[in-house]
Image (spheres, helix red, strand yellow):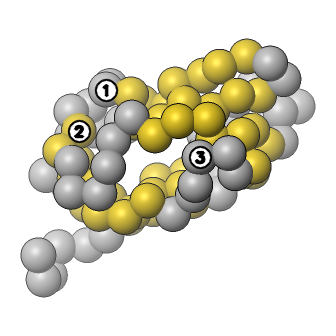
Amino acid sequence: MAGIPVEDLVVPDLGDQVAEATLTRWLVGAGDLVVEGDPIAEVEAEKVNVEIPAPRTLHVVELLASEGQTVAVGEPIARTRDA
């Protein structure tokens, strides 16, 4: 929708000295509505799987990272807009 700001969803801080992770699985796709707290993606860091939750209710506009890709903490992995 025109005029609605788009925001990047980034890899959150994953804990002590973890600088990057592998995006193992998307749990949403472009166009999906996601409710606050729902998991968006799974990442693996140091052999631990972590789900990245939606920070608020939002629409997924575009996926920026691919499954299997290494992503840095703070790196954008999706574009979203408020629902």
Q: Say whether residue 29 is visible.
A: yes
Q: Quick one: label 3 or label 2, which is nearer the N terminus?
A: 2
Quarter where residue 55 is shown: top left
- Disc 3, SS: loop
CA distance separating discs 3 and 2: 19 Å
Q: Nearer the viewer, residue 7 or 52?
A: 52
Q: Are marks 2 and 1 in contact (CB under 8 Å)?
A: yes
Quarter where residue 24 is shown: top right
Q: Which mark is residue 61?
A: none
> Residue lying farthest top?
48
Q: Quick one: label 1 or label 3, which is nearer the N terminus?
A: 1
| Amino acid type of the residue tagged 1 in the rendering | Asp
Name the residue at 67% across, 36% down: 13
- The residue carrying pointer 2 sits among few (fewer than 14), some (14 to 19) or many (20 or more) residues within 10 Å by Cα, namely many
Name the residue at 46% across, 40% down: 26
Q: Nearer the viewer, residue 12 or 61?
A: 61
- Disc 2, SS: strand
Q: Which residue lies under the disc numbered 2?
A: 34
Q: Say whether residue 73 is visible.
A: no
Q: Which mark is residue 38?
A: 1
Question: Where is residue 50 shown, x and y percent of the image?
Answer: 60, 22
- The residue carrying pointer 1 sits among few (fewer than 14), some (14 to 19) or many (20 or more) residues within 10 Å by Cα, namely some
Residue 67, placed above or below residue 2: above
